[in-house]
Amino acid sequence: MIDSDALDRRFRGESVGRALDLVGEKWTLLILREAFFGVRRYGQFVRNLNVPRPTLSARLKTLVEAGLLQRVPYAEDREEYRLTEAGLELFPAIVILMKWGDRHVPDPDGPPIVLEHSGCGKPADAFLACRCCGEEITAHNVTAHPG
């Protein structure tokens, strides 16, 4: 039998839902992806993403207010957007989504981007691993407990 108090608590404080409220919109994730790959200026985001300017402005404002990006002056009367520590922590999520997309909804011409690990020079094959034992974490080898 399902413990209704535990289930109620799980849905009331649902971490995935709160995260998606902030970053779950298509343009938001694409803006973050571009920021991870070095895009910092408004015009670069517009050019790379072909995003409508009002949408870009609104998403950048949200990301700054949420503390994922910060506005940094780079010239007189000019600012650029840089990832904060909280924003940088989303890098693994973007990489896992990219890997999933390459595998399950592939481009017929192959992956548009291949990540190379700077330490060894080999393609970066990202996976989620247990920090304690190093074993890959999958849906089949974890158990959820109330927090």
Image (spheres, helix red, strand yellow):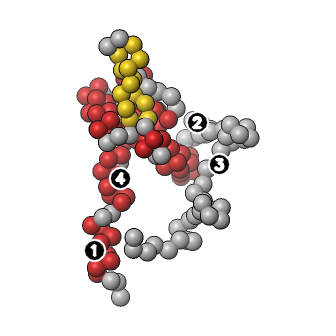
Distance between the alpha carbons at the discs numbered 4 and 2: 25 Å
Residue 9 horizontal side relative to residue 44, left or right: left
Tell me the residue at 28%/79% (across/down).
5
Residue 38 horizontal side relative to residue 67, left or right: right
Q: Nearer the viewer, mark 3 or mark 1?
A: 1
Kind of residue indicated by mark 4? Ala
Which label is found at residue 113? 2
Classify residue 9 by image quadrant.
Answer: bottom left
Judging from the image, what secondary structure is the residue with disc 1 in? helix
The residue singled out by tag 1 in the image is 8
Kind of residue indicated by mark 2? Ile
Quarter of the figure that contains the C terminus: bottom left
Q: Earlier in the sequence, mark 2 or mark 1?
A: 1
The residue singled out by tag 4 in the image is 19
Query: In the displayed structure, would residue 112 be above or below residue 106?
Result: above
Distance between the alpha carbons at the discs numbered 4 and 3: 25 Å
Comparing 100 with 146, the one in front is 146
Comparing 75 with 91, the one in front is 75
Q: Earlier in the sequence, mark 3 or mark 2?
A: 2
Judging from the image, what secondary structure is the residue with disc 2 in? loop
The residue singled out by tag 3 in the image is 125
Q: Nearer the viewer, mark 2 or mark 1?
A: 1
Callouts 4 and 3 close, C-beta under 8 Å: no
Kind of residue indicated by mark 3? Asp
Classify residue 63 by image quadrant.
Answer: top left
Name the residue furthest bottom: 1
